[in-house]
Amino acid sequence: MNQGLIPTTESVYKLIQELNKLPGIGPKSAQRLAYYLLRAPGEQAKLLADAIISIKQKTKLCSICSNVTDSDPCSICRSDQRDQTKICVVEQPQDILALEHTRIYNGLYHVLHGAISPTEGVGADDIRIKELMNRLQGGSIDEVILATNPNLEGEQTALYLNKLISPLGIRVTRLARGLPFGTELEYADDVTLTRAIEGRQEF
Amino acid sequence: MSKPRNYQTEAIIIKKIKLGEADRILTLYTPHLGKIQAVAKGVRRPRSKMAGHLELLTHSQVSLARGRNLDTVTGSQTINSFLPLKSDLQLTAYALYAVELIDQFTVDNVENYPLFQLLRETMHNLCQGNNNELILRYFELHLLNQVGYRPQLQQCVSCHSPLEAITNSFSPRAGGMLCPSCRQSQILTYPLSVNGLKVLRFLQNSDYNTSSQLKMNPELSQELEGVMRNYLKYLLEREVKSAVWLDTLRGQIKQTALLQD
């Protein structure tokens, strides 16, 4: 924000400053949003404010899967419609949204809240691996699906988890890595292509 | 004459930081421009054409466009993806350790071609997957040569007398070996056995092909790792983060070995 400008009103100025702190919102976007809310019907601003307050007050992490939830355990962990023998391991709560959107997976989840990244000093104890291992002790799980991101950190995390879990006699699977839908083959990189050829399937 | 707006270079990707919604700031180590930073736009989207070519620990041909602050990556093509390295937990950890050291010991925009060669060679050697500790020690010593911290291993740094064939000491602060009598006046020294010193000297003065003939037993390997790590830590004035992860993994391997016995 340009501190030299004298704000017209204190409250608008304050809102602009707060919006400016959000990721991806620069000073101009913050101004636009603030003036939009100023003109919008009172209802809308209130709904937004309530929504913001409630995500801080009502949500917590599920004590079983570490997903963000407003009731503990979360709706997925509580549901008897879901396959209780499979756990899909993801890096972030947002990954669950993406997977749920496909409606193809009907098992449980586990959120690690990060991935192993040695150069950033994130080790195995900094993400929720211990919680996952505790869940596997019960013996009711027969498959763990590693859905960490297909980049270097995610791959490291998956390799590490495989090392920990496979001695327990639980089936460990990894999401297939290959060509994304809607792209062109000529731009694919070596790693993706190698994995795509290795993992090719009968038509 | 002004520099051209667009340019191409080979590069090894040594670091990446998230930026905004889908972008990344990459740190590239290049043969003739040294370490540079560049923005890669949209590489966190699944349909990015460049993402796979710009993953950490990849050797790529990169096109860049000059920007006001940071240059922008406009295209990339993998030269070597070091795939064997990326599909092995331990090897990835070794390679990340190497690139972290490169990042820590270099400054932006200073050309160091031998250092680029060393990094490329090290990644390539790690892909072969044997003698990894030796590869790292070789890398550390030659990195120090290149950046101006070559340790003095031939004679005592303090009194300049030749070292006798007994356990002498390595002093990170003095940047080399100390004989037993000079050792007294220095704080923080680490004992280094005769064999240890021989191996370090040999690695320091040979090329990789000659060095790779060497065989180290676990005790010696551990001793040298300790000495080198202390020296690097002293120079950097901080811990090497990826070394912590290397230790975790090693502990894990020992544990599973015990369980299997």
Image (cartoon, coloured by chain):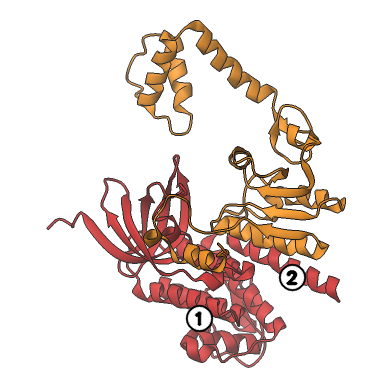
Q: Position of residue A108 (x, y in %)?
A: 74, 43
Q: Is residue A105 left or right of residue A150?
A: right
Looking at the rendering, which quadrant does residue B93 occupy?
A: bottom right
**Mark 1: few/some/many CA within 10 Å (<14, 14-19, 20+):** some
Task: Describe the element under mark 2 as helix, strand or loop.
Answer: helix
Q: Residue at x 73, y 54 (%)?
A: A144
Residue B253 is tagged as: 2
Looking at the rendering, which quadrant does residue B167 occupy?
A: bottom right
Q: Residue furthest front?
A: A203
Q: Residue at x 76, y 55 (%)?
A: A143
Q: Residue at x 87, y 53 (%)?
A: A139
Chain on which label 1 sits: B
Question: In the rendered image of this protein, which colour is used for chain A?
Answer: orange
Q: Position of residue A23 (x, y in %)?
A: 47, 33
What amino acid type is highlighted by mark number 1? Answer: Gln
Q: Is residue B107 left or right of residue A144?
A: left
Point out the image quarter for the C terminus of chain B.
Answer: bottom right
Q: Position of residue A58 (x, y in %)?
A: 70, 23
Q: Is residue B224 left or right of residue A190?
A: right
- In front of the other: B154 or A37: A37
Q: Position of residue B248 (x, y in %)?
A: 70, 63
Q: Is residue B120 left or right of residue A69?
A: left
* First reached walking from the N terminus: tag 2 or tag 1: 1
Residue matched to label 1? B152
- In front of the other: A2 or A63: A63
- In front of the other: A93 or B249: A93
B114 w.r.t. A18: above or below: below
Chain on which label 2 sits: B
Chain coloured red in this rendering:
B
> Distance of mark 2 from mark 1, alpha carbons?
35 Å
**Mark 2: few/some/many CA within 10 Å (<14, 14-19, 20+):** some
